[in-house]
Amino acid sequence: CGVFGAFTQNGGPVLEDVYLGLYALQHRGQESAGVAWVDDNNAIRTQKGNGLVHLALDQEALAKIDTRCAIGHVRYSTAGGSDPRNIQPLTASNSRGSVAVAHNGNITNAEALKQYLENRGAIFHSLTDTEVLLHLMAHQPHKPMIDAFVDSLRRLKGAYSLVMILDGKLVAARDPWGFRPLVIGQRDRIIYVSSETCALDLVGAKALREVAPGEVVVIDKDEIKSIRIPVQTKCHYQCSFEYVYFARPDSILAGRSVYAVRKALGHCLAKRAPCLSANMVTGMPDSGTIASMGFAEGSTLPYEKAIVRNRYVGRTFINPTQRVRELGVRIKLNPIHDLIKDRKIVVIDDSIVRGTTSQRIIAMIRAGGAKEVHVRISSPPVCFPCYYGIDTPSRVELAAARMNIKELEKIIGADSLEYITVDDLVQAIGLPRNELCTACFTGEYMEGETQDELEL
Ligand code: 5GP
Ligand code: SF4
Ligand code: MG
């Protein structure tokens, strides 16, 4: 998912900027979009809908609304399916005030907390893990809202990058492990919070800094205040897959350019698994493009843009059924036949999940007359599900978990298939290993969480 928030410290509307911010974060979720804002009476209002931002929301109407504080969300469902009640921001109000929350990530102990809360009378309206947070806050009626909020965060495990409206203020929070990104920006006297810097660029804001792991940031008309979530952690777990695939290449995460990391991954791959007998390198559009340019540089093979993508088709992975997913690749991609005929080709992609994309594209390239098709993947094999907010399927559906590389090579129909290692990945990102989550590659989940426990 993607989240975005804005607060103006000297008046002037911000809702259209939130709309535009979501537009720049569209790659983080295409299933639904929503915004929430504060009206003149400090009540919270929302507009939400299914599908892409421009279909779900009415830009013209939003642009006319005058508000000092607004948040938004684009949804990519990991928990809760596509029921309209699950569209964020979620809202709640009681005599102490109103809150709206937009969440990126996945709370791993949500089910246990939900049981606990239901035993004490809570009635849940959505199927999202996010709603647990609102009930935890409601169960501390004696405290000021912000204190109830910070105390509730203390009980959560897993991944949350949040933007909220709370007491008419813009509040941002990032889990103590720092799984998902969250950054603060500024333009004049408007303060923004965004999943990625690319959305700050769009609204003309400068990135000030990231919300630190374990930090709550409260933005009101006078100041930006920082509170620590009282949780001790052994290390950070920034998601390495954001660099590989999820984030937009024009974003900067933890001071590293996503584009530069993808290029470096391509270089690593060329060193690790060169394919010098080939005639050319190409990338699976769009997710393999940048790594394939790095591979070409590193291997000195010529680069060609040999596979063309219909740019009006969304990411195939997002489509829910296997059937749609299979058709999706053909709807989306087509090789340039003159370029591939009678040639030996290296195709780079960022990852193999179920194996459908590789299988289809290799068949297509062969049908176009290629002599050999070698596949190189710019991440290690994805062998384990993610429980921290990226929707990788269960182990039985993960191609690299079900079979070894040689078997997978055969299934996808490649002449050869090679990956980089986890060490290569860590090195290309350039952050210390103990600051990165690599659980979907290694099965090492955070602080002793085991897969059996997480599967519940
Ligand atoms: P497959 O066809 O093997 O199931 O999926 C691989 C393709 O899905 C790759 O091209 C990758 O770019 C893309 N992909 C899209 N979304 C995701 C995601 O959430 N997780 C993973 N691992 N890959 C994804
Ligand atoms: Fe990212 Fe993989 Fe960790 Fe999930 S398991 S947070 S996708 S690195
Ligand atoms: Mg792809």
Image (cartoon, helix red, strand yellow):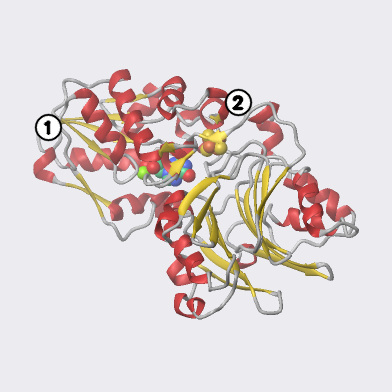
> Which residue bears the numbered disc 1?
343
Q: Is residue 272 above or below residue 320?
A: above
Proximity of marks 1 and 2: CB atoms separated by less than 8 Å = no
Residue at the image position 16 percent from the left and 21 percent from the top: 277
State whether label 1 is within 8 Å of ligand 1: no
In x, y percent, where is residue 231? 75, 36
Along the viewing direction, whichever of 384 and 160 lies nearer the viewer: 160
Between 407 and 235, the one nearer to me in the picture: 235
The kind of residue on which mark 1 rests is Arg
Residue drawn at the location 27% of the way across and 31% of the way down: 294
SS for dot 2? loop
Out of 380 and 22, give the one closest to the viewer: 22
Residue 245 left/right relative to 7: left
Q: Residue 444's mark?
A: 2
Quarter of the displayed picture in which ligand 1 can be seen: top left
Mark 2: amino acid: Glu
Q: Give x and y (percent) for residue 143.
A: 87, 56
Whether residue 87 is visible to the viewer of this picture, yes or no, is: yes
Q: Quadrant of residue 259?
A: top left
Q: Mark 2, residues whose alpha carbon is within 10 Å: few (<14), some, or many (≥20)?
A: some
Can you say whether 33 is above or below 375 in the image?
Answer: below
Q: Residue at x 68, y 26 (%)?
A: 234
**Residue 205 against residue 37 in the figure, above or below:** above
Q: Secondary structure at mark 1?
A: loop
